[in-house]
Image: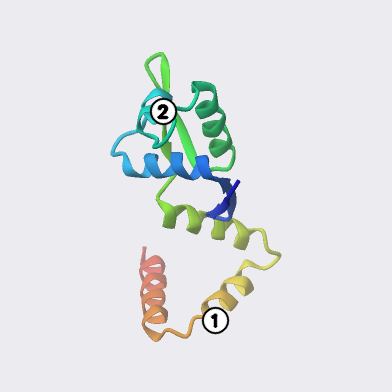
Amino acid sequence: MVRQVVAGRKVGELEVMVLQELWASKAPLGPRELIERLPGKKRAYTTIMTILARLIEKGLVERFENGRTFVYQAAGNHDQLLARAIGQLIRSSNDPRIVLAHLVKDFEDPELINELQDIVSRIEKS
């Protein structure tokens, strides 16, 4: 089984396929809709439910009530999920400021540094 990393979480091939379908959808999807949309052989309902439960546990998918059933959507796009994972790592540090300073320092992109300064200025004003 090929494993990938999405937002700092190891995910399997079917998990990636489910995430891609959720990202592509404009609205949350139910398990049966996912079964129909996934390429290749038809998966069992219980298989998709297991995959969705794993993705929820990893913080990559959210579940919502929709009448008497549940629908699922990605907890954010790829960049949002990655930013959330990085934020969790930074907050887990004894000194998040030092970690963040090292992270920014390692980017030798003056344009990015200027954008970050603009963001900090806007935050300070609000």
Q: Nearer the viewer, residue 33 or 118?
A: 33
Disc 1 secondary structure class = loop
**29 displayed left or right of 43:** left
Q: Mark 2 and 1 residues: CB-CB less than 8 Å, in contact?
A: no
The mark nearer the N terminus, 2 or 1, is 2
Q: Residue furthest right?
A: 94
Task: Give the residue at x 50% y 29%.
Answer: 48
| Relative side of 68 to 2, left or right | left
Residue that appears at 56% across and 75% down: 103
Left or right relative to 93: residue 58: left
Q: In this orientation, which residue lies closer to the viewer: 7 or 20?
A: 20
Q: Position of residue 5 (x, y in %)?
A: 56, 54
- Three-letter code, disc 1: Asp
Quarter assignment of residue 97: bottom right
**Residue nearer the viewer, 19 or 105:** 19
Query: Which label was assigned to residue 122?
Result: none
Task: Tell me residue 10's x, y (percent).
Answer: 60, 50
Label 2 amino acid?
A: Ile
Q: In which quarter of the view is residue 110 placed?
A: bottom left
Residue under numbered circle 1:
106
Q: How many labels sit on residues?
A: 2
Residue under label 2, please give it: 35
- At numbered mark 2, what does the secondary structure look like: helix, strand or loop? helix
The residue sitting at 58% across, 42% down in the picture is 58
Instruction: Give residue 23's position: percent from left, percent from top.
Output: 37, 44
